Amino acid sequence: MEDRRVLVVASPELAAFGYDGVGSFASVQDAVDAVPLNNQVRTIIRIAPGLHQQPVHIPRTKSFITFRGSEIKDTVICWDNMATRIKHTQSSKVIGTGTFSSATVIVEGDDFIAENVIFKNSAPQVSGQAAAVCVTADRCAFYNCRFLGWQETLHLHGGNQFFKNCYIEGNYDFIFGDSSALLEHCHIHCKSTGYITAHGRKSSSESTGFVFFKCVITGNGEAAYMYLGRPWEPFGRVVFAETFMDHCIEPAGWHNGDKPENERTACFCEYRCSGPGSSMSERVAWCKELIGDEAIPFLVKTFIDPDVQNPWLLHRLGTKLPVSTASP
């Protein structure tokens, strides 16, 4: 890969007062649009602090893009789309319809990275499906990011993704899709009754799944009102490992999605979790507590980065691996 390219997005205040874009871009989408088609250069888009009220689309033809926000002040990308009402600079022929196109940021270009960015969907809770980020791209990583919303906050559908030190909130299927994703040292906050995950694996031959490793789950008090997950498709697979679970987690832990037949096919597992919501004594009979070596396949980087000869987390991102995912 060639040397890196850096683009700069001006603060929202400058853009609001007629900023002419000289030397940088007036919006995040403008910077994305400036990246060449079939890009092969790691392009860092430095986004100034502030509230950037706009939807953003990264097409399949634009890979190797990094969104870099401020480490000191909040850098927020916010929009209020919902599945039944889409306001976007792109047409439905480009971004599609439904939940995917409701996202504030749509990522279709592979090898995407985001650092220190807050992604928010500000649609009200009663609006239904409304995502903060939808990802169909492969080899994506998010560091120190926040994902704010209510329903289906984070839509991961296809490819492999890694999340480190992120905050994700919502109430209903707020992490969902059919991808392979590893979330490490992330804070999951449950705003009201619902399901943290809804994974969409369609058959036992698929290698996809969501793994939460050394995460923290919090709620709004002492009551139990949140399920760890339900199968979006019959073979949904989710693993919570060494994760702290607050009182908000229902004693049963998991839900069959009102389809008893899903209990025969869903793969819902827990491993060495802690906290008042982690007790296995009242869990549904069809979830599994992993023991010993059973957990290893889910706790190493090869779960999302299976090519040990050419690991994307190390070489493509150029980012130091967390110790806990560095073992072969």
Image (tube, helix red, strand yellow):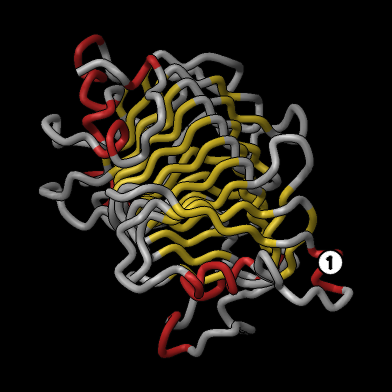
**Nearer the observer, 293 or 284:** 293
Figure label count: 1
Task: Depth check: give the residue in front, 280 or 36.
Answer: 36
Instruction: Evaluate whether residue 232 shows in this view.
Output: no
Q: Is residue 198 left or right of residue 76?
A: left
Residue 10 position by quadrant: bottom right
Query: x, y percentage for residue 161?
Result: 36, 45
- Amino acid type at circle 1 is Leu
User: Picture coordinates of residue 39 (x, y %)?
Assistant: 33, 64
- Residue 304 visible in rendering: yes
- Of the 4 image quadrants, the one containing the C terminus is top left
Q: Residue at 60% across / 32% down in the picture?
A: 187
**Residue at figure coordinates x 37%, y 67% from the top left:** 62
Measured as percent of width and height from the top left, residue 158 is found at 30, 57
x and y percentages locating residue 127 in the rendered image: 68, 72
Front residue of 134 and 29: 29
Q: Which residue is mark 1?
A: 14
Q: 227 above or below 89?
A: above
90 with respect to 46 (left or right):
left
> Crowding at label 1, few (<14), some or many (≥20) Cα neighbours within 10 Å?
few
Q: Residue furthest right?
A: 17
Identify the residue at horizontal 89%, vertical 74% (top origin).
17
In the image, residue 288 above or below residue 198: above
Question: What residue is rendered at 51% in x and 68% in y?
Answer: 32
Residue 88 sits in which quadrant? Answer: bottom right
Secondary structure beneath disc 1?
helix
Q: Is residue 227 above or below residue 17?
A: above
Name the foreground residue: 195 vs 124. 124
